[in-house]
Amino acid sequence: MREKNSLKLRGRQIHLDFHTSPLIPGVGKEFDAREFASVLKQAHVDSVTCFARCHHGMLYYDSKRFPERVHPGLENKNMLKEMIEECHRVGIKVPVYTTVQWDYYTAMEHPEWLAMDEHGMQIGQEPYEAGFYQTLCVNTGYKEFLKEHIAELLEELDVDGIFLDILYPRDCSCHVCRREMERAGIDVKDPARRLAYGQKMIDDFKFEISEFIRSFRKDVSIFYNTSHIGVKQRPVLDAYTHLELESIPGGWGYVHFPVTMRYARTLGLDCVSHTGGFHVEWGDLHSFKTQEALEYECFRMLAMGCKCLVGDQMEADGKLLEPLYEKIGKVYERVEALEPWCDDAVQVTEAAVLTPEEFHGGDRGHLNASLMGLENMFDKLALQFDIIVSQADFERYPLLILPDNIPVDERLKKKLDSYLESGGRMIITFESGFAEDGERYMLCRETGIEALRAPLRTSEGGLARGIITNSNDYAEYIMPGEVIGKRLPKTEHVMYAKGVEVARTAGDVQVMARFVPPYFYRSFEHFSSHRQAPSTHRLSDPAIIRRGNVIYFASPVFAIYNARAPRWCLEMMNDAVMELLGKKMVVHDGPSTLFASLNVQEEKKRYILHLLHYIPEKIAEDLHTVEDVIPLSDLHIKLNLDKEAESAVLVPEGKPLDIRAGDGSVEFTLPRLEGYQAVEIRFRD
């Protein structure tokens, strides 16, 4: 983990969009700075990111350097300045927003600044499509305009930070990028090398702009938004003062935030997460998220060590939609009351997951399937875990998981060996452990695999393992064992993707479950019924094996769970976790829909357990939401803390609970959970 950055974020934020067409008249005609600040204050907001320049390329302040860019319909050219001054007067911080790669005005006025693909066509939307999604290249003269614009914001306005939006690496072949790539000796005919150059260009841009901003003021916050926080941010963290996790359920889904936050919180920067007050996504004007969904999203941020932010877009006439801020206020009032138990709290973890994103990439809408399946599975098991990269400190975690497709080279193998030698425990699944060439298995000694069979191939010649189809063409069966799958009926259970063919294991290996093949794999030449062929009832290759502190699943259990969510995969993984850990930190008798997260404030000698019971539903084609809260009663909780607890109290209510404590564990019963509850557990030295 990096050394913690000194910037501490406010915890009840608003991100206020204002992407307003220059064709709209009377912009801000109803704006009143005192009313604006008052609505925010009443909603318990303590920071609002306001707009300096929008995706239309319009400015919302009295620009002396770029008067031609000031929105032509803006009636009060001091609107942004008045927002800042009045918010500061009531104690609300105001970072300001500016766009980078999307700017319609600039794209129309300076086509020579547009990013170009290898065919010489502009990157982004086509000329006759509605929208401002043409992509500008920051390698062109556009960068000098950006610097002048940012300098004006810092010199003329008392801003608390700069939020720079839309910074994506592009495979750009504009005249400047071509010249710079040729100068650097890059093979411009290779798309991968061009894209790598595009990533470096964006990274260099961030460092340059941050240095430029800090030459004016060193106390402002700086953030570059790419709609996802992942491994690509790691090399450029010094350009950031904090991290903002844009994760709107309407466009990102409900799995994206926890996956992203479990990684982001290991990077040493304070984090805030974006959700939205709208029903679907940005720009969904005059729509309203349900109160229940807003609660779930914000309280989950607190549970995972994140500050809260709700996105909005101001009315064109300059008014805030007060019914929305009444909803936000109800949530933020409770968030404010909980801040003493959230400030400087650190997540307590018992496991770490190596992120597939380090090896295979990942982004909004393109998260690794095994990572999504793992998140959903471990949430149901109440496992407390981080997501880490291979450079991280493994020794901090009692259990390490390599999910489905983590390639291993000599460097990583040596590190894994050292981790095991020091007492670490590992769960490895499917192709994790293969070299990058996909042929050599690197973890033979660790898992006890001595030989692999020749893998089954498709009719096209590719590997059949790991393929999940609608008709389960390559499905096989698994027979649960006495330890892994002990609560399952001792009969075949379908695995919806073919696993790795383990032919032979070492003598000291425990085979904990075996595969049962079907009569044949489904194709046009041989098929049976609607989907997979029936079981032969003949035990075959090892499906789950254990050697020492390593358990290996030959199946892609996490990808299977992401695709089909079979309960038997969840049961078997829980058994494997318990075999290696012995006990989990958080145990409850609630339903699998209960989310539990454990934090600690060491200096205050207390743990904070966050419990949420909201059930997201997919009741629309493209949208998950929450409409109802289903209360739980008499919820029994056991925490294995390895510290002696002396009390448990509902917070912020201050209501004590009866506890049973001893041997490093504490048990209590929560009489009622209605949506969300935090519990403080004080411990002795």
Image (cartoon, rainbow, N blue to C red):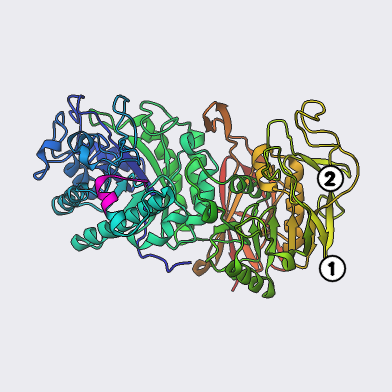
Please name the residue shown 18% across and 49% down the image.
Answer: 153
| Mark toward the viewer: 1 or 2 | 1
Image coords of residue 336 (percent x, y): 42, 49
Q: Separation of disc 1 and disc 2 at Cα?
A: 26 Å
The quadrant holding residue 478 is top right
Image coords of residue 658 (percent x, y): 67, 56
Image coords of residue 638 (percent x, y): 70, 56
Whether residue 320 is situated above or below residue 25 in the rendered picture = below
**465 on left or right of 100:** right
User: Which residue lies under the disc numbered 2?
Assistant: 488
- Region rendered in magenta: 170-179
Which one is nearer the viewer's eye here, 516 or 318? 516
Question: Which mark is drawn over residue 9?
Answer: none
**First-in-chain label (1 vs 2):** 2
User: Can residue 93 be seen from the camera position used here?
Assistant: no
* Magenta stretch encompasses residue 268: no
Please name the residue shown 65% across and 66% down the image.
Answer: 398
* Magenta stretch encompasses residue 173: yes
Q: Amino acid at mark 2?
A: Leu
Whether residue 626 is situated above or below residue 137 in the rendered picture = above
Question: Which mark is drawn over residue 508?
Answer: 1
